[in-house]
Amino acid sequence: MSDAEITFELMRLTALLDVAIESLTIDLYTFENGVFVVGAAEEHGDLIGARLIAIGDLDPETVIDRIEPFIPKDNPMGTRCNTI
């Protein structure tokens, strides 16, 4: 299967779930003292400066640990900038 075929198959399987997912457009950055909102769409500007305390039942550090192997990076800073 080509990359495109895999992508479309995943999209098809996701559609089978028949679940609407609302997107929240925010930019997060991992600082030493936590993950914070550093940018947001105008309608969510009040979130800038807020600390992310959980994603579902998981704390941000656990989420980062789980997805970090899948994030392209060439140094540790790439993980801090691109993970969540």
Image (cartoon, rainbow, N blue to C red):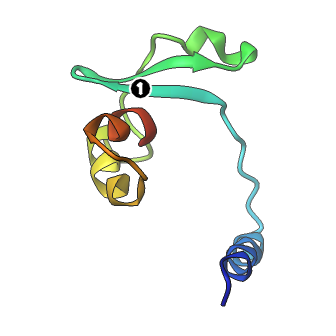
Percent across and percent down for residue 19 are 73, 61
Percent across and percent down for residue 35 are 36, 26
Residue at 38% across, 37% down = 54
Looking at the image, residue 50 sits to the left or right of residue 79; the answer is right
Looking at the image, residue 20 sits to the left or right of residue 53; the answer is right
Give the answer, above or below, for where 46 lies relative to 33: above
Percent across and percent down for residue 77 are 31, 34
Give the answer, above or below, for where 68 lies relative to 9: above
Look at mark 1 in the image and give the residue it sits on. Answer: 29
Looking at the image, residue 83 sits to the left or right of residue 8; the answer is left
Of residues 17 and 72, which is closer to you in this image?
Answer: 72
For the image, the number of numbered tags is 1
Percent across and percent down for residue 32 are 22, 22
Kindly give the residue lying farthest to the bottom in the view shown: 1
Judge whether residue 65 can be spotted in this image. Answer: yes
Looking at the image, residue 54 sits to the left or right of residue 22; the answer is left
Give the answer, above or below, for where 56 lies relative to 34: below
Q: Residues within 10 Å of mark 1 (few under 14, many from 20)?
A: some
Residue at 57% across, 17% down = 39
* Quarter in which the C terminus is drawn: top left
Q: Amino acid at mark 1?
A: Tyr
Residue at 69% across, 73% down = 7
Quarter of the figure with residue 6: bottom right
Of residues 59 and 4, which is closer to you in this image?
Answer: 4
Residue at 66% across, 90% down = 1
- Helix, strand or loop for disc 1: strand
Give the answer, above or below, for where 70 lies relative to 75: below
Judge whether residue 84 can be spotted in this image. Answer: no
Kindly give the residue lying farthest to the left in the view shown: 32
Quarter of the figure with residue 26: top right
